[in-house]
Amino acid sequence: MRLRLLIVAFAASVAAGLLAAATSPASGGDAILVAPANPDGGAPQFTTNGGVVPLRTMRTVPNWTSSFIDPTNGATYPFTMVGTNPSTPTGQVTTTVPTEIIPLKLKFVAGNQKVSTLNFDTYVATAVTASMDASGDAASTASSPVFSPSDFPLSGDTGVQYGDAVMRAQFGKVGTGYHVGLGGPTILPTVTINVPQNQGVAVYNSRGVLVSRVDYNWFSAQLGNLLGQLHIDPRALPVFLTHNAVLYSGNNYLACCVIGYHGASGSVSGNGSQAVQTYVYAAYLKPRTFSGFPDRGHGFSDIHGLSHEVSEWMADPFTTNGVQPWFASTAPQYGCTGLLETGDPVLGYWFPLSGNPDAAAGNVWHPQDEVFLNWFARDGESSALAPSDGRYTFMGSDLGGPLFTSPATGCG
């Protein structure tokens, strides 16, 4: 089947200090999804969902702000990250953000959904009635390296969480008292959501894995409602978890598949201390949900999506960190984008960590590689914020990762 470019509309606006929520999946302006040769697999992608320009007086997660001068264009780029500034004397502290996991149970009914667009070769897609329950995934996630202290041979770090390991490595703080971690987590009661027939469908793919697809805008509206109903402390991080449920856009099952995003929401009005809620959504995936698993570049399983979003949330909690636009051949579906999204350039690249109870996943977890600040900054960051070994990604090109041996280049 000929590859088709699927244009995904992206709209974002900055007004009165508020970056409006995107109405369809895109990350920093990416506008192209490339359908794979096998359409029942989809094209995995991550995105952002709204944002708020950070103010010191906001009630939200702990954060710090700095800037760098890009030496290739002389422009100054401010950025905000979770935790404390590792380059200051007071930065050698531990930051722990309370975390709540909200498992979702999505219920699908087989009806008149037209799923023939997913047919491929001799495979014929059929809609099925299914309940996709993330309750068990929540317990697995809580015991995974995202929350449980683990050892990371890639950086020589021990007894830390995944996000903490990435932050410590990119700022040369391995072996110091600098930490950025997640608390708990507290697992909230499972929320059941009935998905209308015109907003989603469940289908066994050609590899025998049950995968559900949900409309991006409809699903995001449900999460927005839940954020209002659950009354989560804005100083905490809520994590919404789905079981093998991915997102499509434009009433097109092939305009797929968003498997995670992070965002921020809050009012631009208030007395200067208004609450701003940051949040994460991620799909907990079964092996072989997407084709190519478990090759490097195709490690979409278990905590892969959540690891991607947790790291990106730590590096850009309010989704407003702009950089000189970049392009990565390892993730062409993002096109030319100007956001500091640390997981996007290395989409799908993973490294193994032991402890996964799922034998189908090889009994290893599949956390994603992450790109460091120095890659986006073209080495223009302060020397106090540079990795000690000069790497541009957590895995490093000499450790099985993609070849990021030099800083980002432009899009031309």
Image (cartoon, helix red, strand yellow):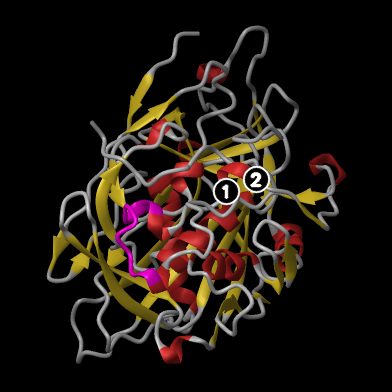
Q: Residue at x 48, y 50 (%)?
A: 343
User: In this picture, is 368 found above or below 206?
Assistant: below
> Which three-letter amino acid code belongs to the residue tagged 1?
Gly
Closer to the camera in the image, 201 or 35: 35
Label 1 belongs to which residue?
396
Q: Residue at x 31, y 77 (%)?
A: 65
Answer few, some or many: residues within 10 Å of disc 2's Cα (few below 14, many 20 plus, some between 14 and 19).
few
Residue 178 seen in the current view: yes
Answer few, some or many: residues within 10 Å of disc 1's Cα (few below 14, many 20 plus, some between 14 and 19).
many
Q: Are marks 2 and 1 in contact (CB under 8 Å)?
A: yes
Residue 134 in the image: state x and y as whole percent: 68, 56
Q: Label for residue 253?
A: none
User: In this picture, is 313 found above or below 289?
Assistant: below
Q: Residue at x 22, y 47 (%)?
A: 11
Residue 99 in the image: state x and y as whole percent: 58, 77
Residue 38 in the image: state x and y as whole percent: 57, 18
Q: Residue at x 64, y 77 (%)?
A: 175
Closer to the camera in the image, 385 or 140: 385
User: In this picture, is 354 found above or below 348?
Assistant: below
The quadrant of the rendering that contains the C terminus is top left
Residue 193 seen in the current view: no
Q: Is residue 98 left or right of residue 190?
A: left
Residue 341 part of the magenta segment:
no
What's the magenta region?
375-383
Q: Secondary structure at mark 1?
A: loop
Q: Is residue 111 left or right of residue 412?
A: right
Q: Residue furthest left?
A: 16
Label 2 belongs to which residue?
399
Q: Is residue 161 left or right of residue 63?
A: right
Q: Disc 2 to disc 1, how far (Cα)?
A: 5 Å
> Which three-letter amino acid code belongs to the residue tagged 2?
Leu
